[in-house]
Structure formats: C-alpha cells, structure tokens
Image: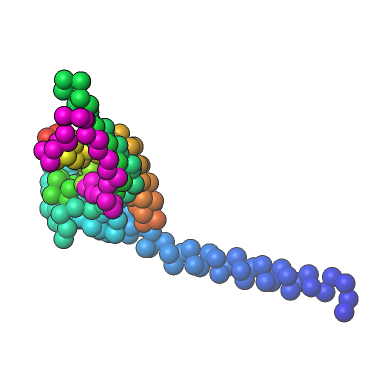
C-alpha cells in the first residue's frame, strides 16, 4: 500500500464525524430550548426539588402563584453525624462528696421541615430561577447504644435515683447543644445548595438559592 493512501479516507471520515456531531446538536436543540421556557423551568425545578428534597415547591411568576407547595413527607434528612457527649455532676454536703459521670454517643440528623414554605420565583432572565427555602434545622438527636455510667457515693451523701434522672436529663440537654455546635447545619446547607444547583444545571437552568426565616416568607 502506498504511503499517504489513507489521506482521502481520513478526510472523508472526519467530515462524516463532524456532520454527525452537528446533526446530533441540532436534534438536541429543541429540547434545550424547551427547557429554558417558563414551562420548562417550572417543570425542571419541580423535578429537581422532588428528586432531592421530596417536596414540590410553590412556583411564582411575579405576584402570580402558578402552583402551590406539595409534599408526601413531613421532614427530609440531608446530613447525619455521630457525636460524643460527656456530663459530670458532683455535690458536696457537710464535706461528703458524691459524683456522677456520664458519656453517651448520639446520632444527629439535620434537614428540613417540609411543612415550612418552599417556593421558586422564575426569572429575572430566561432559564433562571431563585429558590427560597427555610434554613436547615436539627431534626433528631438519638442515643446510640447505652451510656457509660459511673457514680460514687460520699460517706453520708449518697447518690439517689433522683440524682441519676437529673444527670441523664442534663446529658440530653448537652447533646442538643453539642449537636448545634457540631457544624452539621452548615454542612446540610452547603450540601443542599450544591445538590440543587447541580441538578438544575443538568436541566440547563440557572438556580440561585435564598435561605429565609419562616416569618420572612412571603
């Protein structure tokens, strides 16, 4: 075979591939254009929220509400983490010292109350929308296993059942405080923002997130 005999064939193959890519792009163009219409954005955003948060948000165009909010669930968890909580208590009476020491693992879950308002405002440009949603919150702080427990009586100052119950209640309060301080709410907010915008981008929609307190909702 002569050197260079592949030249015309290679040129022909390149032309065929280029033409095929062009045809495919033209075939996809109607779908891409449809996704950027008002109806396309409404349906696309609805699918994004249902896929990730299991809620269909209300959709607004200016002052007009196109459809209302619906959800099959009351809550949705988007982030979880395990925390360790300790609580020590002591009491001295007439020089007699009694002590209770507790340690417990908890599973913290953060997400959204789907009964609070979620809505989407279309615009300002074509294929653009702003999603307004409440801040994530702590949905559950649950014990994992049994607590590590130790108590020590004083000579005449004994640990009572009432002392133990009060210490367990304080441990639960400390768990709630530690859950908020753990950073899980920020993680839930970042995860939600990243996931929603990625899903919207896949539908050729530019989505902006606006977190609001429920009392500030429209």
Asked if the magenta segment contains residue 102, the reply would be: no
Residue 149: horizontal and vertical position, in percent? 27, 43
Give the camera-side residue of 11 and 185.
185
Q: Residue furthest top?
A: 94
- Where's the C terminus, which quadrant? top left
Coloured how?
Answer: rainbow
- Where's the N terminus, which quadrant? bottom right
Q: Is residue 189 visible?
A: no
Q: Which residues are magenta?
A: 140-163
Give the camera-side residue of 67 and 189.
189
Q: Is residue 9 visible?
A: yes
Give the camera-side residue of 165 and 104.
165
Report the side of 154 relative to 52 (left or right): left
Q: Residue furthest bottom?
A: 1
Q: Residue at x 78, y 70 (%)?
A: 7
Give the camera-side residue of 19 and 79.
79
Q: Residue at x 12, y 41 (%)?
A: 161
Residue 131 to residue 29: above or below: above
Q: Residue at x 17, y 48 (%)?
A: 113
Asked if the magenta segment contains residue 141, the reply would be: yes
Q: Quadrant of residue 73?
A: bottom left
Q: Residue at x 27, y 51 (%)?
A: 146
Report the side of 32 relative to 124 (left or right): right
Residue 139: horizontal and vertical position, in percent? 21, 47
Report the side of 218 relative to 97 (left or right): left
Report the side of 199 relative to 39 (left or right): right
Query: Count of labels shown?
Result: 0
Q: Residue furthest front?
A: 155
Residue 19: horizontal and vertical position, in percent? 57, 68
Residue 134: horizontal and vertical position, in percent? 20, 41
């Amino acid at each position: 075979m002569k050197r260079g005999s592949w030249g015309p064939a290679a040129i022909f193959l390149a032309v065929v591939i280029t033409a095929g890519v062009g045809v495919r792009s033209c075939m996809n163009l109607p779908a891409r254009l449809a996704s950027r219409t008002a109806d396309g954005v409404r349906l696309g955003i609805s699918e994004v929220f249902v896929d990730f948060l299991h809620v269909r948000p209300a959709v607004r165009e200016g002052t007009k509400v196109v459809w209302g909010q619906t959800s099959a669930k009351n809550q949705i968890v988007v982030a979880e983490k395990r925390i360790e909580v300790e609580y020590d208590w002591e009491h001295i009476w007439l020089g007699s010292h009694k002590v209770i020491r507790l340690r417990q693992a908890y599973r913290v879950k953060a997400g959204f109350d789907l009964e609070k308002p979620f809505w989407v405002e279309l615009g300002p440009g074509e294929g653009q929308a702003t999603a307004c949603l409440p801040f994530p919150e702590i949905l559950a702080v649950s014990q994992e296993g049994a607590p590590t427990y130790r108590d020590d009586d004083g000579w005449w100052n004994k640990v009572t059942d009432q002392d133990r119950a009060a210490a367990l209640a304080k441990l639960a309060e400390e768990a709630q405080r530690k859950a908020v301080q753990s950073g899980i709410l920020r993680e839930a907010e970042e995860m939600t923002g990243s996931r929603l915008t990625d899903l919207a981008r896949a539908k050729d929609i530019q989505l902006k997130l606006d977190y609001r307190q429920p009392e500030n909702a429209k």
